[in-house]
Amino acid sequence: MESVLEILSYVFWVVLAITILVFVHEMGHFLFAKLFGMRVERFSVGFPPKILGKKIGETEYVLGATPLGGYVKIAGMIDESMDTDYLESEPQPWEFRSKPVWQRMIVISAGVVFNVILAFFIFTGLKLAYGETYIPAENVDAVFVADTSIAYDMGLRTGDRILEVSGNEFEEYEDIQSIESLIADPFTIAVLRGGDTLSMRGPSDIFTQLNRRGGLGISIDPAIISGVMEGSPADSIGLRGGDRILAVGGEEVRYWAAMNGLMQQSSGAPVQVRWMRPDSLAGDADVLPFVRTAGATDVGTIYEASVRPDEQEGAYLLGVYGPTAQVRAQVFGELRRSFSFFEGLAVGLSDTWLNTKGIAVSLGRVFSGQENFRENVGGPIMIAQVTKEAADAGAPFFWNIVAILSVTLAIINILPIPVLDGGHLVFLLYEGIVRREPSLRLRMIMQQVGMVLLLAFMTFVIFNDILRL
């Protein structure tokens, strides 16, 4: 039952996101078609079969059962329906084909424009409602670098202090993996190590590597426990939320990732764990008799005990939860930036531009072969996963994903591929330049080719998503 509910949850969030995007996109086509006096015969969100439909005036408004897109059927326009019956009669004033080229170009482009505008409104609304939280880079004196990571391959090492990312001064910790940094060619990181400034260059297929390895492999999370699983090895030696791990197996620990790595190296054998309990927590519970007091600091008492980690699916676990965002914010002095109305508009516009540029650049790298096509293209299943995770994280994360998907939909739709808006726009540009329409035969063939390509692409991305599960 739980698995069914989980699947329904994925379906709900992805359908909600796609419905919003499709509705706004088609509304752009609809409003400008009506503005220029074109007859809109159908406004559909979703593809057949039809669930609901109601005709108001000259337009039938439809909700389709296949929530993977939508369409606006405008009288006198060759679209994916391949309807050419109207060509046997003279052009009528309300038909798409009878309007000036510039009006038809605006109608075709309006869906893309509306998707970009939607993203702008969402990004602006998020800035005005929630502001921005960030960790000042000056508060991060060193980072942890996993030895199997992209950052390690670039040359970074644990203890490095980051100075620049892609040629820009490192001012906020979040900049290390920002869109602006990653699309720089090349992606670089400059660090301070032992008094020397070193510059490292990232791989040319940075997006492929990020997808493959799950990130750069740089972290700053302190080895502070936020909670302990009942009955776990950590529980058996009295560890509690708020304790800071100082050493595992005699190796000093500063970062959470380092602590977890040392636990894996134990291979399940008993290891000595040393931790510090802040004085503010000292009175919460008695220390277990077999736990040795190993010293004290200005802020707490140090304890030490031997423990055997649990093995679960090949991993050796202490049974503790990592530091929360609140813990990291407290340790590194996270700040919050608020925006006035006009500042929010400016930042929203900037976010829209950066995401548009980032998605366009990454797609360009994919199509040029610089990035791996299969690992950088996702379909409905991947979108469902990302959307569900964002929704679980909270409303700001969900709406941020919707905005990014809206920009993505706009860019894909403007590609010069028949069936898509960009394909229609190419025909109109041709007509505007040479002062005559492309032949009907050519347009019909190109529409059919475009439909085949689109269906083949959708089939590929769905199977690709399944293989990546």
Image: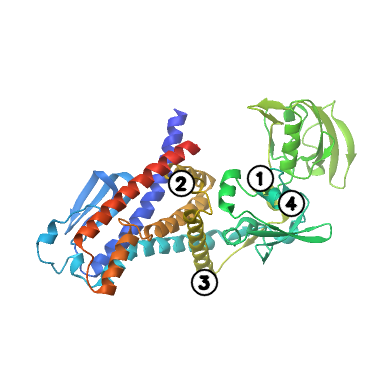
Frontmost of labels 1 and 2 is: 2
Amino acid residing under circle 3: Phe
Q: Earlier in the sequence, mark 4 or mark 3?
A: 4
Q: Residue at x 38, y 47 (%)?
A: 457
Q: Which residue is mark 1?
A: 324
Q: Earlier in the sequence, mark 4 or mark 1?
A: 4
Q: Earlier in the sequence, mark 4 or mark 2?
A: 4
Q: Secondary structure at mark 1?
A: loop
Q: Which residue is mark 2?
A: 378
Q: Which residue is mark 3?
A: 342
Q: Residue at x 54, y 67 (%)?
A: 347
Question: Which of 459 and 284 lies nearest the eye of the viewer?
Answer: 459
Identify the image quadrant of residue 4: top left
- Mark 1 and mark 3: Cα distance apart in space: 33 Å
In this rendering, the answer to whether 16 lies above or below 200 is above
Residue 301 got which mark?
none
Would you say residue 12 is visible in this rendering? Answer: no
- Mark 4 and mark 1: Cα distance apart in space: 18 Å
| Residue 441 image offset from top left, x and y in percent | 20, 58
Q: Earlier in the sequence, mark 1 or mark 2?
A: 1
- Mark 2 and mark 3: Cα distance apart in space: 35 Å
Q: Secondary structure at mark 3?
A: helix
Would you say residue 354 is visible in this rendering? Answer: yes
In this rendering, the answer to whether 107 lies above or below 464 is below
| Residue 79 image offset from top left, x and y in percent | 24, 56
